[in-house]
Image (cartoon, rainbow, N blue to C red):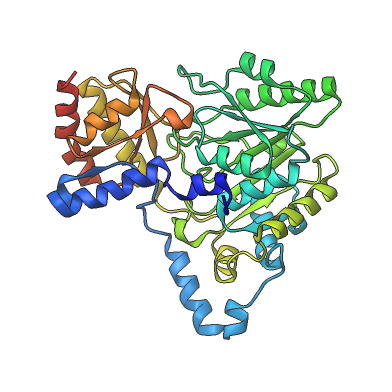
Amino acid sequence: MFVSESMYELGSKRSAIRELFEYGKMRAAVVGPENVYDFSLGNPTVPAPECVNETIRELTQKLDSISLHGYTSAQGDLETRKAISDYLNNTYETHFNPDNFYMTMGAAASLSIAFKALTTCSEDEIIAVAPFFPEYRVFVEAAGAKFGVVAPDTEHFQIDFGQLENMLNKNTKAVIINSPNNPSGAVYSEQTIIKLSELLKKKSEEFGTHIFIITDEPYREIVYDGVTVPYVTKYYDDTIVCYSYSKSLSLPGERIGFILVPDEAYESKKLYAAVCGAGRALGYVCAPSLFQKVIAKCVGQTGDVNLYKKNRDLLYDGLTELGYECFKPDGAFYMFVKALEPDAEKFCEKAKEEDLLLVSATDFGCPGYVRISYCVDEDMIKRSFKAFKALKEKY
C-alpha cells in the first residue's frame, strides 16, 4: 500500500461522535431541525464572555498586521504565558513562571505533544482511566506507545485503585486523568487525587522509574454546586497539565491551550525541552497569535456556567422521572445514562428511530452507557422528553 494503513483507517471514517453529528444534519434537512434531538457533540452553546469580543475588537483596531498576525516565539508569547502563570499562582497558590508553559493548538495538541515527549520506545505504556475521551487511544498510539485502560468504577466514577495498581509496571510512563470528566461529568475528589498520588509514588519507587500524571483539564471551570477541582501539581510533582480554553471561554474552533511542566517534575528542564521538541516534530509551534493575545487579556474569565447547570438539572430531573438511571454530573456538560439494554449501540440505534441522537459509551471504555451532551438549547431538551418517553416504551 502506498499510504500508511493506520492513517488510512483513521482518515477514511469519522469518529462515532462526528458520524452521529453529520447524521443529525442530514435528518434535520428531511424532518426539520426542530424534530431532531441532537445530543451528540460537546460544542459549547454558552456565549464567550464579552471580554473575548471586546479584546478582539481592541486588538484589530490598535495593532498593525505584523503585530496582530505574525509569529510568536515557538513556545508562545511571553506576555500570554506570564498572564497565565500569574492567574494560576493567584488562584491556586502555586509558584509557576512563564517558562513552565508551552502554548498549543488546544487540548488535542497538548495531549499529543505530552505523549510524544514521554514515549521512548514501543514498550512504553500510557494508561487511561475509563470512561475516557476516545481520541486518547489515537494520540497515544500515534506517539508510538501502548494504550492501557482501567475499567470504570460505575458506582462513583472515581478510580478503581486495585485494578490500576495491578496494571502499573516498569514500562508505565503515565496515567491520564480527566476531571471534570468527558463523558461522565464526574469530578475526582481530593481524596482520589491524594490516593492516586500516593500509589504512583509507591510504584515509581518500586520500579525505579517516574510515572507521570497527565491531567487533561478543558472542563476545569465548569463545575456546579460549589464543587472544587483539586489542582494536581500541588499533590504530585511528576504532573503534566494539558489545558484548553475551548470550554471555559467557549472557543472550540479557535484551538488555543497550553501544556504546563512544573519545576518540581523530574528533570523538568529536560522534560520541557522534550515538550518543545515534540511540538516541533509534530508541527505544533507558534499557537494562533491572535488568540494568544486574547487569552492574555481574558485569562480567568468564563462563560455563564449557570446556563449549563440549568440544563443539567432539567435533563436529570426529566429523565429520572421517566425511569432512566442517570449519573448526576458535578461538572462538564455531559450526562451518563445507563442504556435500557446491555448493547448500548443497539440502544442508540433505537433512539435514532425517534430522531434522538445519543452517543454510545463503548468507545469511551464504558459499555452499557450512553453520553448525552447537554450544551444545547434548553427548549430542545424540553421537546426531547417525548422522544425519550417513546424510547422507554419500546422496552
| Residue 131 vs residue 258, the one in the foreground | 131
| Residue 62 vs residue 173, the one in the foreground | 173
Q: Quadrant of residue 115?
A: top right
Q: Is residue 75 visible?
A: yes
Specify whether 158 is left or right of 271.
left
Specify whether 191 is left or right of 43.
right
* Residue at (59% x, 66% y) in the render: 292
* Residue at (62% x, 81% y) in the render: 67
Measuring from the top left, give residue 77's x and y in whole percent. Answer: 68, 67
Q: Furthest-bottom residue in view?
A: 64
> Disc count in the image?
0
Specify whether 261 is left or right of 220.
right
Q: Quadrant of the C terminus?
A: top left
Measuring from the top left, give residue 279's x and y in whole percent. Answer: 69, 57
| Image position of 249 with respect to 151: above or below | below
Measuring from the top left, give residue 100's x and y in whole percent. Answer: 75, 53
Q: Quadrant of residue 288?
A: bottom right
Measuring from the top left, give residue 371's x and y in whole percent. Answer: 37, 33
Q: Furthest-front residue in view?
A: 1
| Residue 285 vs residue 227, the one in the foreground | 285
Q: Is residue 184 visible?
A: no
* Residue at (68% x, 17% y) in the render: 165
